[in-house]
Every structure is written in structure tokens, then in C-alpha cells.
């Protein structure tokens, strides 16, 4: 089983220069198959390394592991512009997913509008069904993890999260870790404690996206429209816009954005410990 120390050794080894799987296997004193499984797991869960096969389909095939270059996160100017906007954003108002949605092929996207009334299920349309599709990984962009309190079709979100972890799904979360979010975050992390797993990992980040990435298949992003930010009469009440898309290239791009933010974010557990050390006067 891959432990944190072995993961760190592999990452440090690859960071120095690209390595073959065989080199990594020898470095960690393991066999090729185990090393390859570790590499694929690290690549999927952290995005810090990638792999490429040379001379594929031949007896001389060679699998190389390389360090993921953040500078190549975006392949064109508008992706780079959007990433920079997300990178410097702090609140949900700082980026509209509509900017991204406009570039996705029409047959690989959909969107809908709902009232932002907390009692209106439309603003969380089929969220439990969406997350239940996960087989390997869920990436979450959130402000304070308030989604963990949802109940849809008599199914508490917290219960679904437990089921995902029990199925072997890893969950990575980017969220503010502050006094306002402590209760929600503790509910998430209690799943780890209850099941004896480290499947849920939270990191502290103030970022503008709100949404989910399920495996390599689908992205859902949410945008909230507040009439107070517009001229009188421009908006007919509060509203929520939900965007979903399935285009493989754009799903990958959103994953890359997640990992770029995640790599430099502070450990949520450490942040919670720091908050817990603050004494009342």
C-alpha cells in the first residue's frame, strides 16, 4: 500500500529529472508492477507527475515518468487568461463559469437556471446522483463545504460521502478553512476517522470556483447571481446558474486548475489545528 513517505520519495526522485518506471522501482526497492501502480495513483490524486510511453506496442516499450509543468497548464491564450483570473480570485464573484462554458462544444455541455432560495432543490439539481457516479476520484471547489449539509431525495450528502469512501473513491477539497467553516469541515473529516481512512483531504484556499469534478468524465460548476450587484430591475431576484460539461479536454483543464491551486494550498488539518489553538479570552 502506498504510504506518504514512499509518495514523497517518488515525487522528489522524479522532480530531479524524468525517470523510467524501472528506475523508480529500484529506487524504492519494489517491483515494476507495484511501482507503476504507485505512479498511477500519485498522478491521479495529485497531478504532480505525468507519464508517457515511448515505442508503445513493441517489446522495447518504455514508460517515462515526468514532473508536471504548471507553466503548460493552458494551451492557448484564453485558457491562460481564465486561469490567471481564477488564480488571483478570492470570492465566487471574481470568476463567472460562463466564460469557460462559452468555449465548450454545444453537444458536450448543458446549463440551467434556478432560484437561489435554500429550500429550492433546483439549485442542487441531481447533485447526489452526479456524485454517486464516481468510481475513482472527486475534486471539490467550495467556499465553506456547506454542501455537506444537503439532503436530496431523503439521502443526506454526508451519508453519500461515506459510501464513496467505502467504495475506494478519493475526495480532494479546496475550501476556506476558517471559523465559519469549521463545523462543515469537521463533518467531512470525521468520515476519515470513522472509517480509518485518509480518503478525504482538505486544503485551505480562497478561490472563486464552486463545483465538482467527477473522475475524468464530468464537471459541474455553480454561479450565484446577486441582484445587489446589478442595477435595479436588471435581475428578477436571486438566481443560481448551473453548468455541466463532458468535453474531455476541458474536463482535463479544470482538473489541472484544481491541482495547480491544490499544490500550493495549506493543509486543512494543520489549519484546523491552528484554529483550535486559539484561546477564548
Image (cartoon, rainbow, N blue to C red):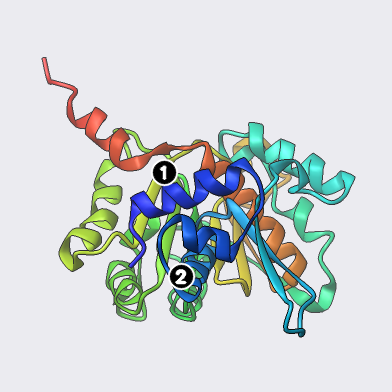
Relative horizontal placement of residue 245, taking residue 99 as reference (left or right): left
Q: Residue at x 60, y 65 (%)?
A: 220
Secondary structure category for the residue under label 1: strand
Residue beneath disc 1: 203
Vertical position of residue 256 compared to residue 71: above or below:
below
Which quadrant of the rendered structure holds the C terminus? top left
Residue beneath disc 2: 121
Which quadrant of the rendered structure holds the N terminus? bottom left
Whichever of callouts 2 and 1 sits on the residue coming sooner in the sequence is: 2
**Residue 104 pos. (x, y %):** 81, 65
**Residue 100 pos. (x, y %):** 76, 55
- The image quarter containing residue 179 is top left
**Residue 56 pos. (x, y %):** 76, 79
Secondary structure category for the residue under label 2: helix
Give the farthest residue toward the right.
77
Whether tag 2 and tag 1 are in contact, CB under 8 A, the answer is: no
Q: Residue at x 52, y 63 (%)?
A: 39
Give 11 or 93, whichever is nearer the viewer.
11
Residue 118 seen in this snapshot:
no
Relative horizontal placement of residue 198, taking residue 225 as reference (left or right): left
Q: Residue at x 56, y 36 (%)?
A: 91
Amino acid at each position: 500500500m502506498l504510504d506518504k513517505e514512499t509518495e514523497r520519495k517518488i515525487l522528489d526522485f522524479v522532480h530531479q529529472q524524468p525517470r523510467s518506471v524501472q528506475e523508480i522501482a529500484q529506487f524504492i526497492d519494489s517491483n515494476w508492477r507495484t511501482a507503476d501502480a504507485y505512479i498511477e495513483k500519485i498522478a491521479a490524486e495529485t497531478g504532480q507527475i505525468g507519464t508517457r510511453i515511448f515505442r508503445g506496442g513493441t517489446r522495447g516499450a518504455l514508460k517515462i515518468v515526468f514532473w508536471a509543468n504548471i507553466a503548460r497548464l493552458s494551451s492557448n491564450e484564453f485558457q491562460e487568461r481564465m486561469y490567471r483570473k481564477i488564480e488571483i480570485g478570492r470570492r465566487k464573484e471574481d470568476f463567472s463559469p460562463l466564460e469557460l462554458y462559452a468555449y465548450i462544444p454545444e453537444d458536450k455541455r448543458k446549463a440551467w437556471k434556478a432560484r437561489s432560495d435554500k429550500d429550492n432543490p433546483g439549485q442542487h439539481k441531481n447533485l447526489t446522483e452526479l456524485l454517486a457516479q464516481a468510481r475513482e476520484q472527486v475534486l471539490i471547489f467550495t467556499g465553506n463545504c456547506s454542501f455537506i449539509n444537503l439532503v436530496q431525495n431523503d439521502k443526506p450528502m454526508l451519508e453519500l460521502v461515506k459510501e464513496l469512501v467505502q467504495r475506494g473513491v478519493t475526495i480532494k477539497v479546496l475550501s476556506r478553512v476558517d471559523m465559519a467553516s469549521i463545523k462543515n469541515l469537521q463533518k467531512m473529516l470525521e468520515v476519515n476517522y470513522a472509517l480509518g481512512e485518509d480518503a478525504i483531504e482538505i486544503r485551505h484556499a480562497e478561490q472563486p470556483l464552486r463545483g465538482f469534478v467527477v473522475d475524468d468524465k464530468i464537471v459541474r460548476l455553480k454561479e450565484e447571481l446577486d441582484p445587489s450587484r446589478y442595477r435595479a430591475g436588471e435581475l428578477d431576484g436571486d438566481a443560481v446558474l448551473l453548468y455541466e460539461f463532458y468535453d474531455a479536454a476541458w474536463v482535463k483543464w479544470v482538473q489541472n486548475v484544481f491541482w495547480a491551486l491544490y499544490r500550493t494550498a495549506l493543509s486543512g488539518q494543520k489549519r484546523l489545528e491552528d484554529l483550535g489553538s486559539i484561546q477564548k479570552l
